[in-house]
Amino acid sequence: MADAFLHLPVADRREALSVAADQSGRPAHLLEKDVWVVWALATLYGSALGEHLVFKGGTSLSKAYQVIRRFSEDVDLTYDIRTIAPDLVGDDGEALPKTRSEEKRWSSEVRKRLPDWVVGTVQPILAEALAVESLAATIRVDGEKLFIDYEAATAGSGYVAPSVMLEFGARSTASRRVCATWFAMLPVWWKASSSRRPGRA
């Protein structure tokens, strides 16, 4: 859904967001941000990274399980530590530190390596997807955080920037996870908007 919506002309996106905002009582600029969150997740999980990527935190409860309903200011993601720091993991593949001091050493080492991994591995995937889909957005990286700054179709508030932040960690092996589908909050209202327009079913 995110791809289809983002490829609409700006005027159509603006109209759909306006209808969605009226029917949901939620600000249009937050609905738009929500779509970009789903686009980012779909892009990463559809790439080679997806197999070892874990979506966690409060945003996952909203997007994947709908346990809570909230808008996403940021996205927390964890990647398999065995890929980012294979030298820290034993020959048996055990990715859990054995002592408190080892845990601290691992955490320190992972924090050092994450920025290079984000720039060298994650950024190219998202940048290529933006280019291929001709989407109006840019990427910037700050340490283990990656930001997707998009051109908003609607005017927002000064408190919520048109930007999605992805924050990465590497403490999981991704061996215990549940596959789920994430949802944007826009689809129902977008369909309602489309059905109102002349010549559309």
Image: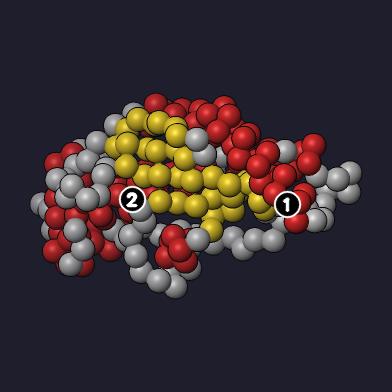
Image check: 33 left or right of 103?
left
Residue lying at 19% horizontally and 42% vertically, measured from the top left: 153
Find residue 148 and report its image quarter: top left
The reply to whether residue 181 is in sight is yes
Residue lying at 45% horizontally and 38% vertically, measured from the top left: 146
Which residue does the numbered mark 1 point to in the structure image? 103
Image check: 95 left or right of 18?
right
The reply to whether residue 96 is in sight is no
Residue farthest to the front, as pictured = 101
Image check: 75 left or right of 16?
right
Colouring used for the render: secondary structure
Q: Which mark is residue 35?
A: 2
Find residue 176 and report its image quarter: bottom right
Residue lying at 65% horizontally and 42% vertically, measured from the top left: 108
> Given the image, on which type of amino acid does mark 1 rest?
Glu
Q: Nearer the viewer, residue 149 or 101?
A: 101
Residue 98 image offset from top left, x and y in percent: 82, 56
Q: Nearer the viewer, residue 81 or 18?
A: 81
> Given the image, on which type of amino acid does mark 2 rest?
Val
